[in-house]
């Protein structure tokens, strides 16, 4: 019987995550051409975004949409977390991810761009 060790599982997960980040970077580079970030800055922001979004979403498409919303409407990630209303929307697991993302995008577009302390 084949046994996969934890270290191997971590390596597979890291490889999968790296592939997703590369695909996301290529996709968002085109869609966010109007955002004033160079490639290095965008890559750094996406690493933060994937880490942040992984708290709320597990699907790559949902993570990609979350990243685009934050970059386009909130100016990216900072050392501060999202404000409480945004976190409550994102963590509302009774709602499907598409609904949570829709609520979050409406909130982000509304001008509530400040981060909570």
Image (tube, grey):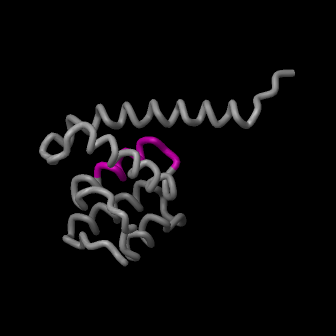
Q: Nearer the viewer, residue 60 or 34?
A: 34
Question: Given the current orientation, which residue lies at the most extreme right position?
Answer: 1
Q: Quadrant of residue 30?
A: top left
Magenta residues, dominant SS class: helix
- Is residue 27 part of the magenta span, yes or no? no
* x, y percent for residue 4: 76, 29
Residue at 50% from the left image edge and 37% from the top image edge: 17
* x, y percent for residue 49: 39, 51
Image quarter (top left, top right, bottom left or bottom right) of the C terminus: bottom left
- Is residue 62 part of the magenta span, yes or no? yes
Residue at 46% from the left image edge and 51% from the top image edge: 51
* x, y percent for residue 41: 26, 44
> Is 20 situated above or below 56?
above
The boundaries of the magenta stretch are 58-68
* x, y percent for residue 11: 62, 32
> Is 69 situated above or below 7?
below
Q: Quadrant of residue 52?
A: bottom left
Question: Given the current orientation, which residue lies at the most extreme left position?
Answer: 34
Report the side of 9 relative to 38 (left or right): right
> Is 102 situated above or below 14?
below
Image quarter (top left, top right, bottom left or bottom right) of the N terminus: top right
Residue at 45% from the left image edge and 41% from the top image edge: 60
The number of discs equals 0
Residue at 29% from the left image edge and 34% from the top image edge: 27
Q: Nearer the viewer, residue 27 or 21?
A: 21
Report the side of 24 relative to 92 (left or right): left
């Amino acid at each position: 019987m084949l046994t996969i060790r934890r270290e191997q599982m971590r390596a597979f997960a890291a490889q999968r995550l790296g592939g997703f980040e590369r695909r996301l970077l290529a996709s968002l580079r085109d869609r966010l051409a109007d955002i004033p970030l160079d490639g290095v800055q965008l890559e750094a922001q996406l690493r933060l975004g994937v880490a942040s979004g992984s708290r709320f979403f597990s699907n790559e498409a949902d993570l990609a949409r979350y990243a685009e919303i934050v970059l386009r409407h909130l100016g990216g990630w900072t050392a501060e977390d999202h404000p409480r209303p945004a976190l409550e929307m994102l963590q509302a697991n009774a709602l499907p991810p598409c609904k949570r993302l829709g609520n979050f995008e409406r909130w982000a577009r509304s001008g509530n761009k400040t981060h909570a302390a």
